[in-house]
Amino acid sequence: AATHIAEAAAAVCPAAGSRGGNGCEVALTGGLFRMGEPLLGPLREELARLVPQARVTTGTGDPLTGALR
């Protein structure tokens, strides 16, 4: 799962060195991330490998609020 999530982030984050590639935020939202380190550890490793310019953040608010933005 960690690899697939990191690949999805890499697909939408601008490449480092490209216009707009100074970084992107990857928000970890949803119940899957309550799994903790068994998912988060490998995910951090994959993000560092595939999207080193990404900043990992946690979601703020609930999913409904995010959908309304």
Image (cartoon, helix red, strand yellow):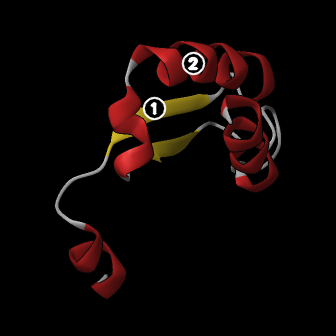
User: Residue 20 vs residue 30: left or right?
Assistant: right
Residue at the spot of label 1: 56
Asked whether disc 1 touches disc 2, contact meaning CB atoms under 8 Å apart, the reply is: yes
Which quadrant of the view contains residue 10?
Answer: top right
Please indicate whether residue 21 sits to the left or right of residue 27 in the image: right
Find numbered disc 2 in the image and state the secondary structure of the residue it sits on. Answer: helix
Image point (69%, 21%), residue name: 52
Image location of residue 62, percent across then percent down: 20, 65
The quarter of the picture where the C terminus appears is: bottom left
Asked if residue 25 is positioned above or below residue 35 in the image, the reply reads: below
Where does residue 50 sit, x and y in percent of width and height? 79, 26
Quadrant (top left/top right/bottom left/bottom right) for the N terminus: top right
- The residue lying at 21 percent from left, 76 percent from top is 65
Q: Nearer the viewer, residue 67 or 4?
A: 4
**Going by the image, does 34 lie left or right of 52?**
left
For the residue marked with disc 2, what is the amino acid? Arg
Label 1 or label 2, whichever comes before in sequence order: 2
**Farthest bottom residue?**
68
Using a 10 Å C-alpha cutoff, classify the residue at mark 1 as few (fewer than 14 neighbours), some (14 to 19) or many (20 or more). few
Looking at the rendered structure, the number of numbered marks drawn on it comes to 2
As drawn, the label of residue 4 is none
User: Residue 28's x, y, as percent?
Assistant: 42, 43
Query: Which quarter of the figure has residue 68?
Result: bottom left
The answer to whether 25 is drawn above or below residue 2 in the figure is: below
Q: What residue type is labelled 1?
A: Val
Of 3 and 60, the residue lying toward us:
3
Residue furthest left as drawn: 61
Residue at horizontal 74 percent and vertical 50 percent from the top: 8
Q: Name the residue under label 2.
A: 44
Disc 2 residue crowd, few under 14, some 14–19, many 20+, Cα 10 Å: some
